[in-house]
Image (cartoon, helix red, strand yellow):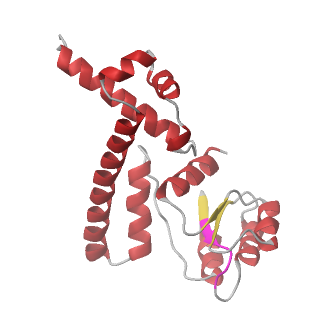
């Protein structure tokens, strides 16, 4: 099968875009990315970059455009599922997990408070918990303590709208992983999930 010059050019352009996204998924800021880094990640010579993009600014605009399209598709999919299934939180997390992973994870439960979270975690093994440090009834620290009593190796990510507190640090000393401050971006959440599940 022969590949035309136009097809090869489009393939290389796609490789550059994917390389930039990959570097950004490592909690890098686009403003700190260099053309050389992107070219190295894409496996091309730096000069070859200019056959596809005028400069890093044009690449950045392309990434924003692609990200916007993907986000609109994601939101459309989530809204449709919410209207069909009813649960906003569960559906949003499921759609998000499908969006960020080639191998989608299954959302097995959601809890409105710490007591409910402990009850759900007691009944089954869960790979990863995403929980707030401040919850009604029982805070995140006590919730995590009780879950660890049943599942000593339980992985968790802590989210909070407040600055990192002693409770956050105490929860991490017990074994919880990354702390992410709300409001957080989809990228920040995706990176935290990937890192925790790799441990």
Give x and y (percent) for residue 109: 50, 70
Is residue 139 toward the left or the right of residue 125 in the image? right
Tell me, yes or no, if residue 7 can be seen here. Answer: yes
Tell me, yes or no, if residue 126 can be seen here. Answer: no
Q: Residue furthest bottom?
A: 137
Give x and y (percent) for residue 175: 77, 59
- Determine whether 12 is above or below 29 in the image: above
Of residue 199 and residue 172, the one placed in the foreground of this image is 172
| Residue 150 is one of the magenta-drawn residues | no
Is residue 101 toward the left or the right of residue 159 in the image? left
Looking at the image, which residue is at 76% across and 61% down? 152
Q: Which residues are magenta?
A: 130-135
Looking at the image, which residue is at 70% across and 84% down? 138
* Quadrant hosting residue 153: bottom right
Give x and y (percent) for residue 161: 62, 74
| Residue 133 is one of the magenta-drawn residues | yes
Looking at the image, which residue is at 38% across and 29% down? 16
Of residue 58 and residue 8, the one placed in the foreground of this image is 58
Of residue 42 and residue 34, the one placed in the foreground of this image is 34
Q: Quadrant of the N terminus?
A: top left
Give x and y (percent) for residue 176: 73, 60
- Determine whether 84 is above or below 176 in the image: below
- Determine whether 112 is above or below 199 in the image: below
- Determine whether 170 is above or below 155 in the image: below
Number of marks in picture: 0
Q: Residue furthest top?
A: 2
Looking at the image, which residue is at 47% across and 63% down? 107
Q: Quadrant of the C terminus?
A: top right
* Quadrant hosting residue 73: bottom left
């Amino acid at each position: 099968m022969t590949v035309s010059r136009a097809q090869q050019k489009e393939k290389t352009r796609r490789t550059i875009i994917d390389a930039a996204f990959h570097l950004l998924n490592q909690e890098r800021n686009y403003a700190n990315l260099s053309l050389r880094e992107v070219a190295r990640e894409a496996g091309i010579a730096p000069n070859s970059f200019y056959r596809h993009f005028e400069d890093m600014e044009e690449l950045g605009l392309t990434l924003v455009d692609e990200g916007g399209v993907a986000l609109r598709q994601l939101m459309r999919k989530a809204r449709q599922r919410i209207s069909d299934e009813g649960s906003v939180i569960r559906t949003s997390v499921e759609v998000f997990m499908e969006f960020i992973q080639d191998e989608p994870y299954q959302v097995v439960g959601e809890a409105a408070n710490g007591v409910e979270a402990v009850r759900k975690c007691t009944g089954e093994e869960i790979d990863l918990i995403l929980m707030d440090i401040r919850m009604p009834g029982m805070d995140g620290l006590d919730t995590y303590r009780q879950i660890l009593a049943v599942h000593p190796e339980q992985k968790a990510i802590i989210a909070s709208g407040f600055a990192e507190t002693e409770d956050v640090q105490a929860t991490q000393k017990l074994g919880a992983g990354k702390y992410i401050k709300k409001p957080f971006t989809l990228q920040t959440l995706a990176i935290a999930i990937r890192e925790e599940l790799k441990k």
